Image: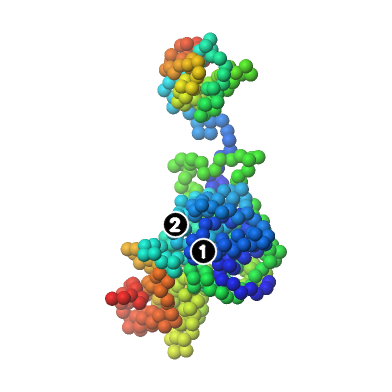
Amino acid sequence: MPKTSYSRPTIGATGETGSWRTFDPVVNYNECSKCRTCWLYCPEAVISVDEDGTPHTDYNYCKGCGICAQVCPKQCIEMVRTDERKRRTGGV
Amino acid sequence: MKTELMSANYAAARSIVSARVEVVAAYPITPATTVPEQVAFLNEEGIYKGQFIRVESEHSAIFACIGASSTGARAFTATSSNGLLLMDEGLHWAAAARLPIVINNVNRSVSPSWNIHVTHDDSISKRDTGWIQFYVSSVDEVYHTIIQSFRLAEDERVLMPVMVNSDGFVLSHTLSTFDYLEPEEVDKFLPPYSPPHWVMDPADPVSHGNIVFPEYYQEFRYMMHEGTKNALKVYEEVEKDYKKLFGKYFGGPIDCFKCDDAKVVFTSQGSMAAEAIDAVKELREEGYKVGNARVRMIRPFPVERIRDLGSHVKAFASFDRGVSYGFGGPVANDIRSSMYNTKHRPMVKSYIGGLGGRDVTVADIKEMILDTYNAVETGELGPEETWHDLME
């Protein structure tokens, strides 16, 4: 053991924090303007964007805080129960 | 090596030049003020080549040192009394983060009542933070103990911060000669510091001070305890090297004078422990078999050294310039604890006094030693604790 605690950056160093979530953000891609506001505000940096700005949430680590849904200028991110999200997205 | 004439605080400021300290962060407080004042002066003059960070409080001072030490820099600060207490959170942090910072704490009474003179309560109350604690008796010893402390703190077997305590005014503002060492001379003794485990480096990021769950926390605390205890053995090596290189030796964790055949040994910390040598000399001339044990290191507590003394003396007269309120003399109680699991039972009489800078003279010390001597002669312990020179 080292003499004092330290850790090196790894994905999910403290486990899959996505399990803490009650509501999941779901983006309505028909409405999304690809403005990247959700990506900018996400406090956990679990939103990645494609080159054209299309956002994707990493549900393994998203804690479900809902900030993305609040800040979305188009108000096209909805917070829904996990089973509802899976029903809408075909289980992804 | 050359002889200089300075106060202990000015000498402390010179020690950081000699030890090639890289960062000093300090906030002024009487009687430590002239340490950072001199560091600022030496910095302006280009003699101290490291960084001097002017912070807005002692809390910031210790945390600036923590940041500096985390990057692998050699860091130092100086403070007193309420300043040390404001550092409290950082003192625990530095010890648990295993950062080899050195503090020169210039002992001063804690308020109220407002008093700028010496009492050891400020540092004694920080005894359980993990910091190694020295108490020194002369300007020369302040200067050299600070240099030694970096080597001790940075040793991988120890890797704990060190507090060098010097009595306010009695040492801090009193001029005396000391032997100054050029940085080039100290290089032979003190290599540059290189953190052995982790380092704060943007090119290779680590998170430190991070969350540790109950499965591991206790192990880190055990390692702190081991590290601090190792300081006793490592300090022996440090002093041996120092003596070989510079001819300086201050007596180890407990500096004994005429203890070998003594019936009663007087223990104390700080400047008055040097005064006690004169008291012992006079009492020896008067035919009393007494000795002086100057306790230089109280954490780690030199248990084996005390047991060795306790195996052949009849009594300890233990003087504390501080109090653990509700339990008495801190070092007296440590001496009692050290002896408990041995078959020897010397009397331990505790004396408390000299608080708020009240003078403790040779006559005072002789009176306390004779009080214990009398207890040995009559076989009656009498009071376990006496407040010396207490007004009715």
Residue B105, x across and y down, in percent: 50, 63
Q: Does residue A90 sit above or below B377 in this rendering?
A: above
* Picture residue at 42% right of the left edge, 17% below the top: A81
Residue B327, x across and y down, in percent: 34, 64
The mark tally for this picture is 2
Q: Does residue B45 sit above or below B259 in this rendering?
A: above
* Picture residue at 59% right of the left edge, 56% below the top: B24
A46 or B17, which lies in front? B17
Q: Disc 2 marks which residue?
A: B85
- Characterize the local packing of mark 1: few (<14), some (14-19) or many (20 or more) Cα atoms within 10 angstroms: many
Please, what secondary structure does the residue beneath circle 1 have? loop
- Characterize the local packing of mark 2: few (<14), some (14-19) or many (20 or more) Cα atoms within 10 angstroms: some
Kindly identify which chain the residue marked by label 1 belongs to.
Answer: B
Q: Earlier in the sequence, mark 2 or mark 1?
A: 1
Kindly identify which chain the residue marked by label 2 belongs to.
Answer: B
- Assign the N terminus of chain B to one quadrant of the image: bottom right
Residue B221, x across and y down, in percent: 48, 50
Query: Residue B234's quadrant in the figure?
Result: bottom right
Q: Any mark on residue B32, and which?
A: 1
Q: CA distance from mark 2 to mark 1?
A: 14 Å
* Picture residue at 57% right of the left edge, 48% below the top: B67
Query: Residue A64's quadrant in the figure?
Result: top left
Residue B132 shows in the view: no
Q: Residue furthest right?
A: B184
